[in-house]
Amino acid sequence: MSNTTKKPVKKKKPQQKYKVIVSDEETFEEIISLKTNNFQLFLFAFLYTIFVVILTTTIIFFTQFREYVPGYPSSDLLLSAAKITVKADSLERELALNAQFFSAIESVLRGDPNQTAQSILDDTLTQNDLGAAQIVAPIPQDSVLRAYVENQDKFNLTRNQLLIDSKSYYSPVKGVVTDGFDIEKNHFAVDVSVDIGTPVKAILAGTVLFSEWSVETGHVILLDHGENLISVYKHNSKILKSQNETVRAGEVIAFSGEEGALSSGPHLHFEIWKNGLPIDPETILSFE
């Protein structure tokens, strides 16, 4: 006979079962009982954990409790930041417009109508217009013709004078015009010969844009009369108004003189600018 011994076969351990009982504390009477096993317990614990995570995330990110999380900004702070951003953008645009405006005023002081006209053009063009201008390539012949027409029309009084003829002006001084408005000589003003100390009057009511002394033109004062209309008074011996002051039509704003290196004698150098372009003062004012 064979002495071989058979190895015992391991029986699979049956899945362990549990029974959860809820009973009365005093009478031990069974109220609720629940039978479960290892897999069901694991599944229940897993689902419970998922539920707790979702609930906690929802409470933190979709309720006011998120403000208590360290490093998370509050809604008031976000609102304040948005308002500050809007104000900063507005201030940035306002500063850009002011810079362009003062650049135009500087061009008026230098007597450069081309730059001021370009400033007005930049203000009126929209971003779409600029994009279209960049896309369409100009034809050389068309550019030459356009430049000629614009040069002829730039100092055409019909366009700008119609906008200012309806107003009632005061003559700044009475005297003899020694040097008139001359485009070819780049003299965009009239020089009126008067005695030193003659009162200089504002042609219209307005606000003082500029009131300073310069080496070339002496005491200079610029008035803003609204509707892109500016008057300029140069070579004064004394100025009576300061920047940002308001003046009445016909009010004395300065006394004439011969101040400045460009002065050739006692006179008033007077200019009128409309929409960034010079206007011949003698077409609307009488100096005699």
Image (tube, rainbow, N blue to C red):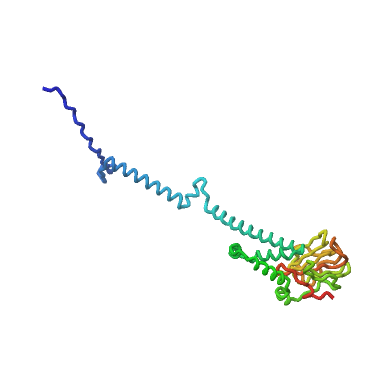
Q: Where is residue 57 in the image (x, y as percent from the top left)?
A: 43, 48
Q: Position of residue 185 (x, y in %)?
A: 79, 67
Looking at the image, how many numbered discs can be counted on the residues? 0
Which of 204 and 195 lies nearest the eye of the viewer? 195
Whether residue 232 sits left or right of residue 73 in the image: it is: right
Farthest front residue? 141
**Residue 16 vertical placement versus 128 (above, below):** above
Which of 282 and 166 lies nearest the eye of the viewer? 282
Q: Position of residue 156 (x, y in %)?
A: 72, 73
Q: Which quadrant of the rendered structure holds the N terminus?
A: top left
Whether residue 211 sits left or right of residue 100 in the image: it is: right
Look at 85% across and 62% down and name the residue there.
259
Q: Position of residue 28 (x, y in %)?
A: 26, 42
Look at 31% across and 44% down and name the residue there.
43
Image-quadrant location for residue 254: bottom right
**Residue 187 vertical placement versus 1 (above, below):** below
Question: Can the viewer see residue 286?
Answer: yes
Whether residue 79 sits left or right of residue 60 in the image: it is: right
Look at 62% across and 59% down and name the residue there.
90
Q: Which quadrant of the rendered structure holds the C terminus?
A: bottom right
